Amino acid sequence: MLVNDLADCLSNRVEVRPDYIIAMPLHRSRLRERGFNQSMELARRAARNLKIPLLLHACQRVRDTPPQSALKWKERGRNMRKAFTCTQDFSGKHIAVVDDVMTSGASLNEVASALRRAGAAEVSAWVIARTLPHS
């Protein structure tokens, strides 16, 4: 399975081990539409490989925002404001957020902000692919 190969490659690149791993949360309507969270599948395998706890429900996407791909680059940050909440205390912890693709970084920035509000001392972004803005 490709997801396992990608997660294995990601796991092999980890140099600093976080306390916990979370997957980029999907809103429940998007999850229902897709049937799975691709970031969760990557995070599940990476967490197993690294023997680091994967927190399944510690953070949620509370706003059903339009897909980032449908928006102009500069609109993406505004689209993601207050889209996430965390229900667990992360005081002093290092959290790795697993996502499949990073484009503008707006989603990762916003989930990192939610984690910091929940006390996280450090947040790392683990992504499989990075897209660049069109010139």
Image (tube, helix red, strand yellow):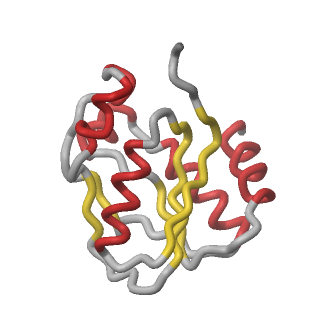
Q: Is residue 131 left or right of residue 83?
A: right
Who is closer to the viewer here, 123 or 62? Answer: 123
Q: Is residue 54 above or below residue 99?
A: below
Residue 48: quadrant of the picture: bottom right
Q: Is residue 81 left or right of residue 4?
A: left
Q: Give percent across and percent down for residue 1.
A: 71, 39
Q: Residue furthest top?
A: 135
Q: Is residue 62 left or right of residue 89?
A: left
Q: Residue furthest front?
A: 135
| Total numbered labels placed on residues in the image | 0
Q: Give percent across and percent down for residue 131.
A: 57, 28
Q: Is residue 82 above or below residue 75?
A: below
Q: Who's the residue at 71% across and 43% down the image?
A: 6
Q: Give percent across and percent down for residue 47.
A: 63, 66
Q: Who's the residue at 50% across and 52% down the image?
A: 40
Who is closer to the viewer here, 106 or 33? Answer: 106
Q: Who's the residue at 80% across and 58% down the image?
A: 12
Residue 100: quadrant of the picture: top right
Q: Who's the residue at 39% across and 85% down the image?
A: 91
Residue 64: quadrant of the picture: top left
Who is closer to the viewer here, 32 or 86? Answer: 86
Q: Is residue 83 above or below residue 95?
A: above
Q: Give percent across and percent down for residue 27.
A: 28, 45
